[in-house]
Each structure stands twice: as structure tokens, then as C-alpha cells.
Image (tube, rainbow, N blue to C red):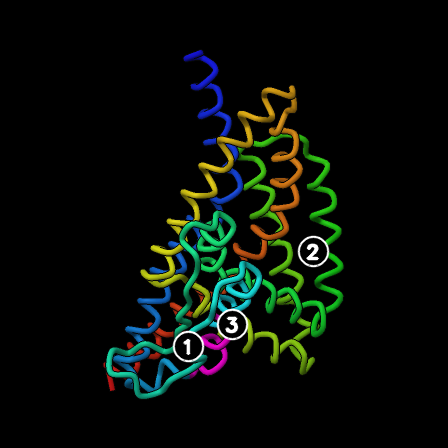
Amino acid sequence: MLNFILDIFKVSTIEIFYITVAIIIIGYLLGILEKMINTNMQRALGYKGVFLTAWLGTPIHELGHAAMCIIFAHKINKIKLLQINSPDGTLGFVEHSYNNKNIYQRIGNFFIGIGPILSGIFVLLLSIYLLLPNSINVFQHSLNNNLAYNKIDLNLIKLSLLSSVSLMKFIFVFSNLSKLGFWIFIIIAFDVSSHIALSKPDIKGATDGLITLYILLIFSNIVAKGFNINTFDYIIKITKYNVYFTSLLFMALMFSIISFFISYIIYFIKKTL
């Protein structure tokens, strides 16, 4: 009996890890970079410096929360996509309520919390598809080759990173520099990537939903074990297709890193003048 329980916890922990680890780690790194970018821009240009990217990035961030609220049946009490003169510096927010006893709505807290990452990645993907169709074709070809990989290990993360680097290489080609679509995409990418990170309230809400999801996964594995169903096979399929999402997350991280260096250069120039 003890071995059965330990096995269930082991499988459930591995499954939840591979489903969420990329979002958690990259989301955390994006949060650190966003704070440093905003600090540099405020020091260089004042509070208005943040709005160079927030005018687009913040509404997309908040719409990510709002969309997940609708999907998981949460009531949106108040929403502000962008506010300029907030006393505490909050650029936008979504206030929502839900039934604490409803498991579906409790799990929804996780997806509502990471909503800005989902909406940000969606906008980046849509922008590439509409503005740089040749780049997205190369990206899809690279990922389709990676989906032939049949195991869950660190190599999947490596494949995601390589696919993301490949996409960046085909975005920043010389021939794109003369295209209007390229420059529109660059503006969108910098704005979205600079505000894709999660705030402390976002992380707090996502944690509650993640715990509920983990508990549900444990019970699902107990039931599946009773019917001799190998849930790990399904997780492998989900994780393989999660390579698409992780690759775009890496791309957002790269753009955020570039944004940090640009913001630091602006701050350095302003400081030395």
C-alpha cells in the first residue's frame, strides 16, 4: 500500500513538473527582467518612460487575466486595462471573484494567474504569422522535426531553446530590414515581452490553482491506476506539444533580455549627460 501511494505521488509530481516547469521558471526570469527594465526607464525618462512599452503590453497582460476568468467561470468585478496616474504605480488590474468550493474554478486560478503569459505568447505567435509568415513556416518545420522525439527529459528543453534560436535567426535576417511588417513586429515583441511577467498577486493566485490541479492529478492517477491506464503516455503527448509554447516563451525571454540592455543604455546615456 505504501509503495502504491509513493508511486502515485512520484508520477503526479513528475507530470505536474513537466507541464508547468517552463512557465514557472521563465515567468520568474521575465519578472526579474521587467522590474529592472522599468527601473532603468523610470530613472532615465521618469514614469512616462514605462509607458513606451506599457501602452500595448499592459492591456494584453490584463486581457490574458480576463480571458481566463471567462473560460473558468470567474466573475469579473472590475477591470482596468491601462491606468496612467495610479497612486501605487499599478498599470492595470483585473478584480474577480469565484466559488471557493468549485474545483473547476479553483483550478482556474492557476490559468488566470498565468493568463498574461498565455495572451502574450498568443499575440507574439499571431504577429509572426501575420507579419513574418516566412519565419513562422521555418519555425513550424523545426518544431515538427522535434516532435518526433519520444521521451521526456532535459533534451526537450534543449530542443525548445534551439527552435526558439532558429526562429530568432529567421526573424533577424537582412532581407526583413526593408519590410514594414518586420518593424511593426519588433515594436509588438518588445512591448509584449516587457509586460508578460506575473505580478505577486498573479503568482499567489496561480499557486492556489496549481495546488488544486496537483491534488486533482493525484486522484486522477489513483483512478487511472485502478483501470490500468498509463497517464504518463498522455503527459508525454502534452509535453511534446508544449515544446511549441516553450519555444515562444524562450523567444519572449530573449526579447526581454534585449529590452533590458536597451533600457540600461538609455539610462547610462541619461546619467552621463
Q: State the image quarter where residue 99 is shown.
A: bottom left
Q: Are dots 3 and 2 in contact, CB under 8 Å?
A: no
Q: Position of residue 59 (x, y in %)?
A: 48, 77
Q: State the image quarter where residue 248 is shown.
A: bottom right
Separation (CA) of disc 2 from disc 1: 38 Å
Left or right: residue 61 versus residue 160 is left
Position of 31 relative to 157 (above/below): below
Left or right: residue 5 versus residue 240 is left
Residue type, mark 2 in image: Phe
Image quadrant occupied by the C terminus: bottom left
Secondary structure at numbered mark 3:
helix
Residue 78: assigned label? 1
At horizontal 50% and vertical 61% (from top left) the residue drawn is 115
Bounds of the magenta segment:
52-61
Q: Closer to us: mark 2 or mark 1? A: 1
Q: Earlier in the sequence, mark 1 or mark 3?
A: 3
Q: State the image quarter where residue 86 is shown.
A: bottom left
Q: Determine which residue is flagged by label 2.
A: 139
At horizontal 41% and vertical 13% (from top left) the residue drawn is 2
Along the line of sight, the residue nearer the viewer: 250 or 198? 198
Secondary structure at numbered mark 1:
strand
Would you say the magenta stretch is mainly helix, strand or loop? helix
Separation (CA) of disc 3 from disc 2: 26 Å
Residue type, mark 3 in image: Leu
Q: Residues within 10 Å of mark 1 (few under 14, many from 20)?
A: few
Q: Determine which residue is flagged by label 3.
A: 63
At horizontal 66% and vertical 68% (from top left) the residue drawn is 126
Q: Are dots 2 and 1 in contact, CB under 8 Å?
A: no
Q: Residues within 10 Å of mark 3 (few under 14, many from 20)?
A: many
Q: Earlier in the sequence, mark 2 or mark 1?
A: 1
